[in-house]
Image: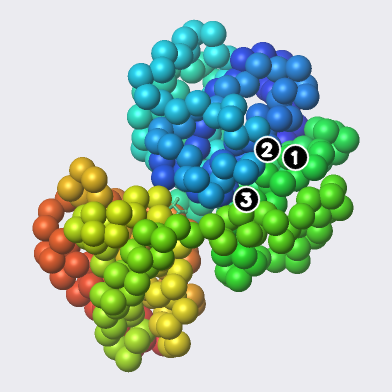
Amino acid sequence: MNSFDEISKILQKNNNFLITSHINLDGDGIGSELALYSILKKLKKKPIILNQGKLPKVYDFLPGVNKVQYLEGDYIDTKSIDVGIALDCSNVKRMGKTYEIFKNIKTIINIDHHTSNENFGDLNYVDSSVSSVGEIIYKLIKFINIDLLDEDISTCLFTSILTDTGSFRYSNVSSKTFKIASDLTSFGIKPHLIAANIYNRNTYPGLKLLGEALSTLEVADSNYVSWLTITRKMLNNTKANDEEIEGIIDVATTLDNTEVSILFRETKDNKIKISFRSKGNFDVNKFAGKFNGGGHPNAAGCLCSGKMYKIKEKILSELINDIRYLKRKS
Ligand code: 5GP
Ligand code: MN
């Protein structure tokens, strides 16, 4: 792994930066992008943020959010870009179509916290012991010059941490996470307003979709495994959009005695996107890896092609097998 010293030298030495994150952008992706963007601006650099797909509406309150560009036929002259920075991407596929642009950049910095990270950068900073990339960006800022930190940047970094820890509920929370969150709060941010912006702005269709999704709840092994299903029909009936699916899986994990919960959903392009959450020792990152996916030990995903019922059958039987095998072993 490279050091903050090596990374900050590259930041200081170059001028034009392209920052990106993963498809289905989340709070950690956008929060760390915007924080790094502001720092580079303060260092008198020329950064651009480019992502595939739209920003989920819940993040529209973040300071600087209007600076983000979305890949929709925009022309980016890659020759003018010195350094590409990938945030929260375990591999280049996670960038989606942005990689087509990214791959032509001379120097790539990969900053991430996924155990499954493939170290695809010319410089790699991957720390899977932290809750979020936001924590890493905070440390990087501290290394460069803590005076660069301000209320707006703190709001973005707090959003990264809040969302990637499921509001400080996941096992990736450490005393260091709270220490950083506390330091950020000292810059005058309002944690309750950040949380309200992200979690208390459900739409009517979004809540109706939650209702439909919950009515599909199924369980196996005395609730040990629980799963939900979202079809295009449910999205059409409720008039909810895809970004309103975010967070629904977390409701399944609240079921008592559930260790692994799954959400199966049909995507716009007829694929099946599967999200996994684990509350205990079952490593869903490893499990998703069997289906070309990945993520973290407690939150992972994969994308499959085929019929919903067949994919469900395959994934559930394999998962239940693995769980029973591990139970027998322990
Ligand atoms: P979600 O279920 O919220 O989409 O994703 C949970 C976690 O799994 C995130 O950290 C995300 O980066 C990762 N993840 C989701 N889908 C995929 C996938 O198809 N491939 C890989 N490598 N990671 C994924
Ligand atoms: Mn993350």
Please state which of residues 251 and 94 is positioned toward the viewer in this rendering: 251
Measure the C-alpha gap from mark 3 to mark 1: 13 Å
| Label 2 crowd bin: few (<14), some (14–19), many (20+), radius 10 Å | some
- Asked if residue 311 lies left or right of residue 140, the reply is left
Mark 3 to mark 2 CA distance (whole Å): 13 Å
Is residue 181 rendered to the left or right of residue 226?
right
- The earlier-in-sequence mark between 3 and 2 is 2
Q: Where's residue 106, x and y in %?
A: 51, 16
Looking at the picture, does residue 246 appear above or below residue 62? below
Q: Residue furthest front?
A: 204
Instruction: Report, in whole angstroms, how far the alpha carbon at label 2 lies from the one at label 1.
Output: 6 Å
Q: In which quadrant of the rendered view does residue 66 lie?
A: top right
Of labels 3 and 2, the one closer to you: 2
The mark nearer the N terminus, 2 or 1, is 2
Q: Is residue 218 left or right of residue 176?
A: left
Instruction: Identify the residue at horizontal 35%, vertical 29% (top origin).
Output: 97
Q: For mark 3, does the 10 Å Cα neighbourhood hold few (<14), some (14 to 19), or many (20 or more) residues?
A: many
Residue where numbered disc 1 is placed? 152
Residue type at tag 2: Pro
Which x, y percent locates residue 25? 47, 44
Mark closer to the chain start, 3 or 1: 1
User: Which residue has dot 3 on it?
Assistant: 160
The reply to whether the C-beta atoms of the residues labelled 2 and 1 are less than 8 Å apart is: yes
Establish whether ligand 2 lies closer than 8 Å to the Cβ of label 3.
yes
**Residue 80 horizontal/vertical position (percent):** 54, 8
Does the CB distance between marks 3 and 2 fall below 8 Å?
no
Kind of residue sitting beneath label 1:
Asp
